[in-house]
Image (spheres, helix red, strand yellow):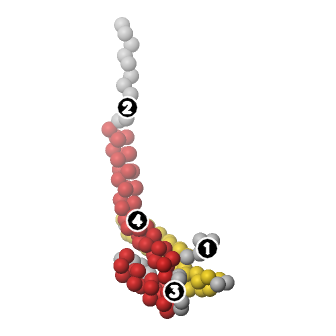
Amino acid sequence: MAGKSRQRGISLITLIFFLAVIGAVGAVGMRAFPSILEYQAALKAINRAKDEGTVAAVRAAFDRSADIDNITSITGKDLEVTKEGERVVVSFAYEKEYHLFGPAWLTLKYVGSSNPGR
């Protein structure tokens, strides 16, 4: 009598569990991805705006870029404009919150600066 070979693979319960985990991670990622794109657009906007002459001009240039790139989380008045030596440094910080379910929230904290060392 030949021995029975054992079947290999995953069970249906394991497959459902893995699909649920992948679905949950995907749902959180879909909520966070547009926010990450907005952050990248804000970094590009402050790097373009830092070359303006005055604080008001920097903020106005950022607001123009924000209108074009659909940046809604921050405005020009939220920017911190400082001078380090001869360079103008523009920075910002903000939070985005997304309700997931029940008492669970996803909080993303963004900090950006036109000075790469900060």
Number of other residues with Cα within 10 Å of mark 1, as a class: few under 14, some 14 to 19, many 20 or more = few
Q: Amino acid at mark 2?
A: Gly
Q: Quadrant of the C terminus?
A: bottom right
Please tell me whether mark 2 sits on a helix, a strand or a loop: loop
Q: Which mark sits nearer the N-terminus, 4 or 3?
A: 4
From the image, state whether disc 3 or disc 2 is nearer to you.
Answer: 3
Q: Quadrant of the N terminus?
A: top left
Q: Is residue 67 above or below residue 100?
A: below
Residue 90 picture quarter: bottom right
Q: Which mark sits nearer the N-terminus, 4 or 1?
A: 4
Residues at marks 4 and 1, CA–CA distance in whole angstroms: 24 Å
> Which residue corresponds to mark 2?
9
Q: Which mark sits nearer the N-terminus, 4 or 2?
A: 2
Residue 116 rendering spot, x and y as whole percentages:
59, 71
> Which residue corresponds to mark 4?
32
From the image, state whether disc 1 or disc 2 is nearer to you.
Answer: 1
Q: Assess whether mark 3 and mark 4 are in contact (beta carbons under 8 angstroms).
A: no
Residue 108 makes an appearance in the image: yes
Please tell me whether mark 4 sits on a helix, a strand or a loop: helix
Residues at marks 1 and 3, CA–CA distance in whole angstroms: 20 Å
Residues at marks 4 and 2, CA–CA distance in whole angstroms: 34 Å
> Which residue corresponds to mark 1?
118
Number of other residues with Cα within 10 Å of mark 4, as a class: few under 14, some 14 to 19, many 20 or more = some
Residue 105 makes an appearance in the image: no
Residue 53 rendering spot, x and y as whole percentages:
54, 89
From the image, state whether disc 4 or disc 3 is nearer to you.
Answer: 3
Residue 25 picture quarter: bottom left
> Which residue corresponds to mark 3?
52
